[in-house]
Image: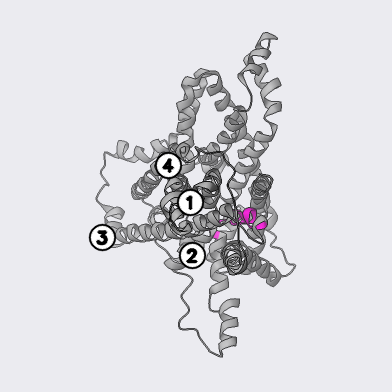
Amino acid sequence: MNRIVVPLALLLFLPLFGLAAPFLFTGGDHLTTGTLSHLWNFVLGGYIVSTLILILGVGIGIFILGVGNAWIIARYDFPGKKVFEWALILPLAVPTYVMAYLFVDLLQFSGPIQSALRALLGMDSLWFFPDPRSLSGAVWSFSFCLFPYVYLITRTAFLERSGRLIEVSETLGYSPLQGFLRLVLPMARPAIFAGMALALMEVLADFGAVSYFGVQTFATGIFKAWLSFGDRVAAVQLALGLLSFVLLIFFIEQSSRSKLRYASSSRDRPLAKSLHGKNAFFAFAFCGATLLCGFLLPAFALLQLLIKQGLTIDIRYLDWLSNSLSVSVLTALISVALAVFFAYSVRLNSRLSWVNRLLGFGYALPGAVLAIGILSFLEIFQLAWWMSASVLVLVYAYLVRFLSSSLQSVEAGLTRITPSMDASAALLGLSKAQILKRVHVPLLKRSLLTAGLFVFVDVMKELPATLLLRPFNFDTLAVATYQLAADERLAELALPSLTIVLVGLFPVLLLSRVISKS
């Protein structure tokens, strides 16, 4: 088993070799000429600036929404808290590109909000109303869609801090705000950075939302270089530029996660403070407004589009659904099997633990970067025809991208199985493979189901890698939603979008159930 672990893990890193292959095989002849030179002279600076502004804006937005809601839920008791503490993670069920389409549909000139305001004010146009399809609109959309990453991790960190620390700070003369800023916030900083890093990596990996908003980032540049200019080397170089952003954020996230132990020294139950009157109203209003903008309004817009479409169903919908389900189920099954193999191998030989840490890097790879690496690798070895022959290349890309999520779930399940159980089974004459089959797998059923469910949902929502690597005439729900939005056929995208959202609700509701029980 140990002889297979390392080669199999390295097989999942071939896309990174694909990014370096053009320079190794061409000798760097295209480094400063052709498409990249054109991009450098005219648009590359804009890519960098818009990407940095987007990251900064979304970072501020998710910090305010995530930390603010986490502190209110963890520290205070007020009417509606029991609902908000799990409902605030519902925006995770809405893919960023679907949120973008619904955000613009709600706020555009012909949308319900502007139409209602014009009728109320008796005006033909609202000159003061901002354009929703802009960089600022993208910041708002991403912030309300991704703040649960910060909320979940930060809420846990706040709950692990004893409420008595705030009371002590108040006895020393600090106001509640000063105690929060000077004591609680610094102690929760690693958790906050970890959540923000996860959210910002999603922003960098996104293509559907930013392209719909008309924001020119590295992700949109990669698609233009490959699909519009047909320049593989320029696409690879832009992918490497995007990867450098992601690696920086990935390093920050890993560094913050390694320091999380410093934020959990106390296991005392936090003392929640009851709010009444206007304070309770303000807490309810802040959490309620966040939930309204992050989930309720998009859900309303989606249902409105579905009603506008009527009972007619696109005849291609069943093909989209079948394609999405087939690749999602296949990827989930293979991913769970690989996760069990790698996790059990590390359990048997702790010296292989670096392999699982290496595989954890896959979730940091943006779909566009991953796809360009695979395409470049296939082109070097004249194997690009594989893409049109089967979905195996697409499934491989999904495995590289999402294996880490199933691996983490299986590893967490294995930690609850004590080594003494392995020793007892070995004394009864069972081999290592038999121990895995007859002892571990039955005890890991819940972890395996959770791992498969999360990979299944991630594959259903994935857009950039699917756009570049899918076989001809193989459209998934995500691809169909993007194409319908690009054609401004918003009413027709309601059904595939609603399907994706409903599928995404399963793990979110599972997670919310765990939160409500805790």
Q: Is residue 383 visible?
A: no
Q: Quadrant of residue 456?
A: top right
Looking at the image, tell me whether mark 3 or mark 2 is earlier in sequence order: 3
Q: Residues within 10 Å of mark 2 (few under 14, many from 20)?
A: many
Mark carried by residue 199:
1
Q: Nearer the viewer, residue 387 or 469?
A: 469
Determine whether the residue tagged by mark 1 lies in a helix, strand or loop.
helix
Magenta-span inclusion, residue 516: no
Residue on which the image places disc 3: 41
In the figure, 81 relative to 435: above or below? below
Q: Inspect the image, locate mark 1, and give the three-letter code of the amino acid beneath it.
A: Ala
Task: From the top left corner, tell me how far across and down residue 10 is, in percent.
Answer: 45, 29
Start and end of the magenta stretch?
83-97
Looking at the image, tell me whether mark 3 or mark 4 is earlier in sequence order: 3
Task: From the top left corner, tell me how far across and down residue 132 is, in percent.
Answer: 49, 71
Q: Inspect the image, locate mark 3, and give the three-letter code of the amino acid beneath it.
A: Asn
Q: CA distance from mark 2 to mark 4?
A: 25 Å
Task: From the top left corner, tell me how far across and down residue 148 is, in percent.
Answer: 55, 53
Q: Residues within 10 Å of mark 3 (few under 14, many from 20)?
A: few
Mark carried by residue 140:
2
